[in-house]
C-alpha cells in the first residue's frame, strides 16, 4: 500500500515539476484573478507503512519563486494563543514572518510561557490570571511553546514567509484560498516528521486561475517526542508540576 501511494505521488509531482519548468506568470501579475489550491495529505508510519487515521495538523504553504517576492506587511497582524484550562488554544498556530502573537492568561492561576528550543526563543515570566503578554515572531520555523509550571501545556507557532497556507483536517484535506496565479514552491510541515522527509516534499508548482488540485502528499511519520524539560533545562519538579489548582 505504501509503495502504491508513493508511486502515485512521484507521478503527480513529476507532472507538476514539468509544468514549473515552463514560463509562468509571476504571483500577482494578473490583478483581480484568484485561485484555490486544494489537496489531501496521508500520514504513513515510517516503521510499518500503516496509514494513520488522523491526518490533521499538517501545514501546507506556498512561497513565490521565479524572481517574485511576496511582499508581506511590515507587521502582518495580531494573533492570539490562549491559556485556558491548562491548555494552549490553538495548540498549532501558523503566522507570517514578523507577526505579533498575544498570550492571554484566561485561567484563574499563574502561567509562565516560554520557548527556548527551536525557532523564536523567549521567556514571558510568571504572570497572573487576566494578564496578557506578546511576542513578535521574527524567526522562521517552528517555535515549541511550553509552560514552566504545567508540563502538559504544549503548542507550536509555525512562522512562515508567506500569506498562503492551510492546515489539514482530520481526513487530510486542505485548501488554500485567494492565491495569486503564478509560480510557487510548495512547503509541508508536520510535527512528527523528519526535517529530511519534509524537505523531500518541497516541490515547484504553477498555480492557475480557478481550482488547482495537488497530487496526494504522503508523509512518513516518526515517533512523537515524549516529555520536555522546563525553562532551566531540568526535569519538572513533581510537586511544582501538580499544584493544588
Image (tube, rainbow, N blue to C red):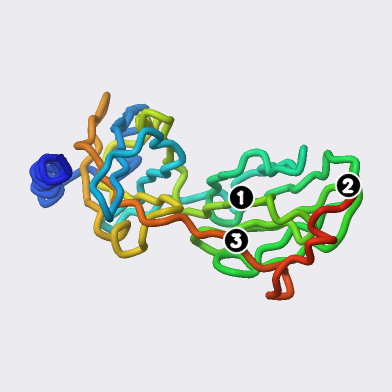
Where is residue 227 drawn, in percent x and y? 60, 61
* Residue at the (66%, 68%) spot, across then down: 229
Q: How many marks?
A: 3
Corner quadrant of residue 90: top right
What residue is disc 2 on?
Answer: 131
Q: Nearer the viewer, mark 1 or mark 2?
A: 1
Residue placed furthest toward the front: 238
Side of 22 relative to 106 (left or right): left
What x and y, as percent, mark residue 152? 68, 51
Q: Residue at x 22, y 37 (%)?
A: 216
How many residues crowd around disc 3 within 10 Å: few (fewer than 14), some, or many (20 or more)?
Answer: few
Viewer-proximal residue among 185 and 29: 185
Depicted 122 relative to depicted 232: above or below: above
Task: Compute the Cα span from label 3 to label 2.
Answer: 27 Å
Residue named by callout 1: 155
Q: Residues within 10 Å of mark 1 (few under 14, many from 20)?
A: many
Quarter occupied by the C terminus: top right
Amino acid at each position: 500500500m505504501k509503495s502504491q501511494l508513493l508511486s502515485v505521488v512521484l507521478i503527480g509531482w513529476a507532472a507538476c515539476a514539468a509544468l514549473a519548468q515552463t514560463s509562468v506568470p509571476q504571483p500577482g501579475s494578473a490583478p483581480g484573478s484568484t485561485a484555490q489550491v486544494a489537496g489531501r495529505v496521508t500520514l504513513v508510519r515510517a516503521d510499518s507503512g500503516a496509514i494513520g487515521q488522523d491526518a490533521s495538523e499538517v501545514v501546507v504553504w506556498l512561497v513565490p519563486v521565479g524572481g517574485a517576492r511576496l511582499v508581506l506587511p511590515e507587521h502582518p497582524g495580531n494573533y492570539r494563543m490562549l491559556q485556558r484550562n491548562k491548555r494552549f488554544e490553538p495548540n498549532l498556530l501558523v503566522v507570517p514572518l514578523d507577526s505579533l502573537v498575544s498570550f492571554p492568561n484566561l485561567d484563574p492561576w499563574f502561567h509562565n510561557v516560554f520557548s527556548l528550543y527551536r525557532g523564536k526563543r523567549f521567556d514571558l515570566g510568571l504572570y497572573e490570571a487576566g494578564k496578557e503578554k506578546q511576542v513578535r515572531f521574527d524567526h522562521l520555523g517552528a517555535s515549541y511553546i511550553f509552560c514552566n509550571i504545567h508540563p502538559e501545556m504544549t503548542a507550536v507557532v509555525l512562522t512562515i514567509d508567506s500569506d498562503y497556507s492551510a492546515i489539514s483536517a482530520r481526513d487530510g484535506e486542505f485548501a488554500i484560498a485567494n492565491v495569486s496565479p503564478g509560480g510557487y514552491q510548495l512547503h509541508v510541515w508536520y510535527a512528527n516528521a523528519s526535517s529530511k522527509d519534509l524537505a523531500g516534499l518541497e516541490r515547484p508548482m504553477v498555480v492557475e486561475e480557478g481550482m488547482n488540485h495537488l497530487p496526494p502528499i504522503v508523509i512518513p511519520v516518526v515517533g512523537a517526542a515524549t516529555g520536555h524539560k522546563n525553562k532551566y533545562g531540568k526535569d519538572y519538579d513533581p510537586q511544582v508540576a501538580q499544584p493544588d489548582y
